[in-house]
Amino acid sequence: MEKIVIITGASRGIGREIAKRLAKKGLKVIANYNKSEEAAKELKSELKQEGIKIDIVKADVSKREEAKKLAKYALDKYGKIDVLINNAGISEYKLFTDETDEDWDKIINTNLYSAFAMSQEVIPNMVHNKNGLIINMSSAWGVVGGSLEVIYSVSKAGMDGLTKALAKELGPSSIRVNSIAPGMIYTKMNEKFTSEEIEEIKEEIPLGKIGEAQDISKCVEWLIEDKYTTGQVISINGGWIIT
Ligand code: NAP
């Protein structure tokens, strides 16, 4: 039977690109969205024109009940989940001293709690099948910290901690857990930067360019084929951050 994959935050950007690549490879894709219903519908119909069927499921994965609903959709329809990609995320660009408790809750719940809740919802099925892969979309800022993006950096560092600890706990059940930590990728998330700022960032990147969502989706495809990589934070950033 084909592999069943849930991708959170697949209505646009990196998640959308992952959904397209995996669906074209023959995986059964459940593409989650929250607010961007039109974009999710467009993705579904774009793939349908190529004869590929995907499921789109609305859920705010920062909330337990909705994370549960998303996992249940996959289990009720397909009976198993092979791959979970915790990709949904939001960013901020604010002085630390201006951050509020509401900012903290929103960013931590969307980026980190969602990965906790979604993982808990799918792991029993993966343990039962003694098979599974969880990919957490973290960030270079989780590794080295980003000025004006402190809560975001905390959320991504938390995801990497989740990855490492869960990889140890779930390895004996043949479940792999990895993070992918992108540098800067062209998506709506980076619309906040001016073209001058983007040029300055490019100058700091040894490969001299901003990444594309395909650079990330190729790594996801590779991790799905791989059998022996777990507990790792895989940096894809053009050499911008080398640790
Ligand atoms: P994006 O274009 O802004 O897309 C974010 C996606 O997350 C959207 O599909 C959005 O869906 C979804 N989302 C947000 N809140 C959600 C929620 N509560 N429930 C379900 N879905 C939710 O961002 P992106 O650049 O593709 O980012 C994808 C991931 O990569 C994020 O985790 C981000 O932190 C990480 N990342 C990105 C970069 C970069 O340079 N772009 C760098 C490092 C890491 P709706 O619009 O439907 O709500």
Image (cartoon, helix red, strand yellow):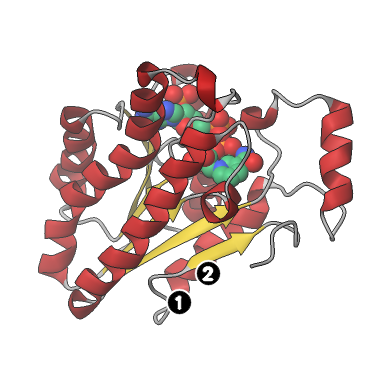
Residue 243 is situated, as x and y percent measured from the top left of the image, at: 64, 67
Tag shown at residue 196: none
Q: Quadrant of residue 242?
A: bottom right
Q: Is residue 33 visible?
A: no
The Cα–Cα distance between marks 2 and 1, rounded to whole angstroms, is: 6 Å
Residue picked out by circle 1: 226
Q: Is residue 171 left or right of residue 124?
A: right
In the image, taking residue 108 as reference, residue 187 lies left or right, namely: right
Label 1 CA crowd tier, 10 Å (few <14, some 14–19, many 20+): few
CB atoms of marks 2 and 1 within 8 Å:
yes
Disc 2 Cβ-to-ligand 1 distance below 8 Å: no
Q: Left or right: 145 with respect to 230?
A: right
SS at badge 2: helix
Who's the residue at 46% across and 73% down the image?
A: 225
Mark number, residue 222: 2
User: To which quarter of the image does residue 87 belong?
Assistant: top left
Query: x, y percentage for residue 36?
Result: 47, 20
Q: Residue at x 38, y 70 (%)?
A: 231
- Relative to residue 10, is residue 216 depicted above or below? below
Does residue 212 appear to the left or right of 119 in the view shown? Answer: right
**For the point 82% across and 35% down, which residue is it?**
198
Ligand 1 within 8 angstroms of badge 1 C-beta? no
Q: Is residue 241 above or below residue 9?
A: below
